Amino acid sequence: MAGHVRFGARTGGALVILGVIVTFIGLFLSDSVVLLFGMLPTAILGVILLFTGLELASTAGDIGAKKEDIYVMLATAGIAMVNMGVGFLAGLALYYAIERKMARL
């Protein structure tokens, strides 16, 4: 949804239209989905994903005023690049270790 908003979708109607298009393609054009996606240049997909990532990353400034919050975010993001589940669990463990004064930064 962040990508949709970044490219101008400001109401819920845009998501409804997207849902209708995806449903139509899934029901009636399912045999040629690979061909349809093959027509989309990868450079365009890369730009869309880049701006979506930037839109989501722009909220990182609101993560918290404490430096511990930023360390938890960076550790979680770094580990999640390798394994999402392990990153999530490591972030939880680090957060609770800091909260319970078991770890100090």
Image: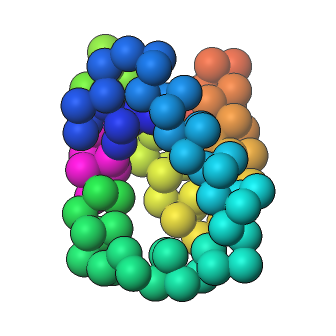
Q: Nearer the viewer, residue 32 or 38?
A: 32
| In the rendered image, the vertical position of residue 20 relative to residue 35, given as above or below | above
Q: Nearer the viewer, residue 101 or 36?
A: 36
Q: Residue at x 63, y 79 (%)?
A: 32
Task: Choose top left, top right, bottom left or bottom right for residue 87.
Answer: bottom right
Task: Choose top left, top right, bottom left or bottom right for residue 27.
Answer: bottom right
Q: Position of residue 43 (x, y in %)?
A: 25, 77
- Left or right: where does residue 52 sit relative to residue 21? left
Q: Residue at x 72, y 70 (%)?
A: 30
> For the image shown, how many numbered marks are present on the structure?
0
Q: How is the image coloured?
A: rainbow
Does residue 52 show up magenta in the picture?
A: yes
Task: Choose top left, top right, bottom left or bottom right for residue 96.
Answer: top right
Q: Quadrant of the N terminus?
A: top left
Q: Position of residue 71 (x, y in %)?
A: 42, 39
Q: Which residue is situated farthest in the front direction here?
A: 28
- Left or right: where does residue 41 sit relative to residue 101? left
Residue range highlighted in magenta: 50-58
Name the dominant secondary structure of the magenta segment.
Answer: helix
Q: Residue at x 54, y 84 (%)?
A: 35
Does residue 61 show up magenta in the picture?
A: no
Q: Quadrant of the C terminus?
A: top left
| In the rendered image, the vertical position of residue 90 relative to residue 2, given as above or below | below
Q: Position of residue 83 (x, y in %)?
A: 66, 66
Q: Position of residue 97 (x, y in %)?
A: 68, 31
Q: Is residue 33 visible?
A: yes
Q: Nearer the viewer, residue 8 or 20?
A: 20
- Left or right: where does residue 23 sit relative to residue 79? right
Q: Residue at x 23, y 31 (%)?
A: 8
Q: Nearer the viewer, residue 39 or 45?
A: 39
Q: Is residue 69 visible?
A: no
